[in-house]
Image: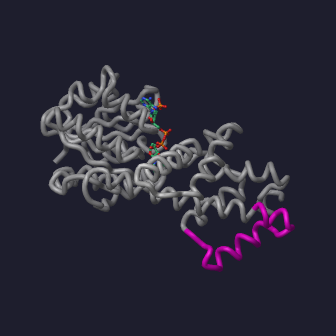
Amino acid sequence: MPRTIGFIGTGLMGRGMARSLIRKGHTVKIYNRTRAKAEEVAEIGGKVVSTPAEATEGSEVVVTMLADPAAVLNVIEGADGVLKTIARGAVLIDSSTVSPPICMRVLERLKASGAHMLDAPVFGSKNEAEKGELGLIVGGDREIVDRVKDVLDAMGKTIYVGANGMGAYTKLVLNLIIASTLQAFNEGMVLAAKAGIDPDLMFQVIQSSRARSGIIDMKAPQILKRDFSPFFPLKLMGKDMRLVLETAGALGVEMPFINTLSQVYANCIRDGLAEEDFAATIKYLEKQAGVTVKSREFGA
Ligand code: NAP
């Protein structure tokens, strides 16, 4: 059954997610802070609106896909925010990567309005978002998950991880592993290049060994081609490392490695790499070492 859905945040990921919902025949009211990005999505259907409150009004389900905690709080609690118009019984699916306390704060606010919430951060990138093939890591009441199953299914595959906030915890753990793995790859490749090992050959050896991983499979070809156009902007992975540290601090867990990694991201952002893909952390290492990790094909 087609539904009326509010979609808020049509950036790199939200664009494909909103389009997947439109393709499934839902009536989607699209809001984005920069209106032009909402208009691009609406080229295939849906209606562009001017505020989060307008996207929410009369919607059974509202999906948010926003940069960080500040963006989520702005859209939910701001002057023309979701809380102004959300209906009793409506469900907010927040797919932004934020911290568990932010999820709980939004949940409490929505509860006070008689609405429900799921934290549903995603894995996959803009290509999977466009195809409706993301992984959605969902926390919240099982009954609410079942109630919006068709909406979740349109965006990807659901992995239910427990109560509200658990989706956010799980996503942060996932990203700390992904960022750490890529950092190890980047440091290794820079060391290899400095030692005079051909980057293509080094990559070939990694791929033949247990050092191989999903994130290296994806990012190595981009690095070797020197293509740092953003799939996942570096500033957002930097934000995630900060959220990991915040979360670990609250739980009394030491994270010596992520402490250092978070500093690497801060340095890269200071060096002007914020908008590039997070694979561009290698540029910072290359600058220090005086080498470039580049495939022979692209003129090493
Ligand atoms: P993005 O392209 O930077 O989009 C961010 C969105 O947030 C845009 O719609 C932006 O609006 C909006 N926004 C930022 N600050 C705002 C504010 N103060 N008020 C209202 N709207 C605001 O990022 P993305 O890659 O789509 O990522 C979205 C979320 O998904 C992030 O939490 C990210 O960590 C997570 N994520 C990303 C990926 C990935 O591969 N890219 C994968 C998994 C999870 P404007 O267009 O006006 O700037």
Q: Is residue 89 left or right of residue 36?
A: left
Question: Does residue 124 lie above or below 113 as drawn?
Answer: below
Q: What is the number of callouts on the image?
A: 0
Q: Residue placed at 25% from the left, 31% from the top?
A: 56
Q: Position of residue 252 (x, y in %)?
A: 44, 55
- Residue 253 lies left or right of residue 88; in this view the side is right
Query: Residue at the location (67% across, 41% down)?
Result: 273
- In this view, the residue farthest toward the bottom is 209
- Please name whichever residue, 73 or 259, is drawn nearer the observer in this view of the structure: 259
297 versus 122 height, above or below: below
Residue 3, by quadrant, is top left
286 or 56: nearer the eye?
Answer: 286
The image quadrant where one finds the C terminus is bottom right
Query: Could you tell me which residue is drawn at 49 percent across and 56 percent down?
Result: 175
Residue 78, quarter of the rendered image:
top left
Residue at the image point whose x is 34% and y is 57% from the top: 137
Residue 9 place in picture, x, y as percent = 40, 36
Residue bounds of the magenta highlight: 190-213
Residue 263 left/right relative to 95: right
Question: In the image shown, does 210 or 155 lie closer to the viewer?
Answer: 210
Scheme of image coloration: one colour
Q: Residue furthest front?
A: 252
Asked whether residue 201 is drawn in magenta, I would say: yes
Q: Is residue 215 above or below residue 275?
A: below
Q: Position of residue 42 (x, y in %)?
A: 37, 33
Percent coordinates x, y for residue 152 in the rendering:
28, 52
Most frequent secondary structure within the magenta stretch: helix
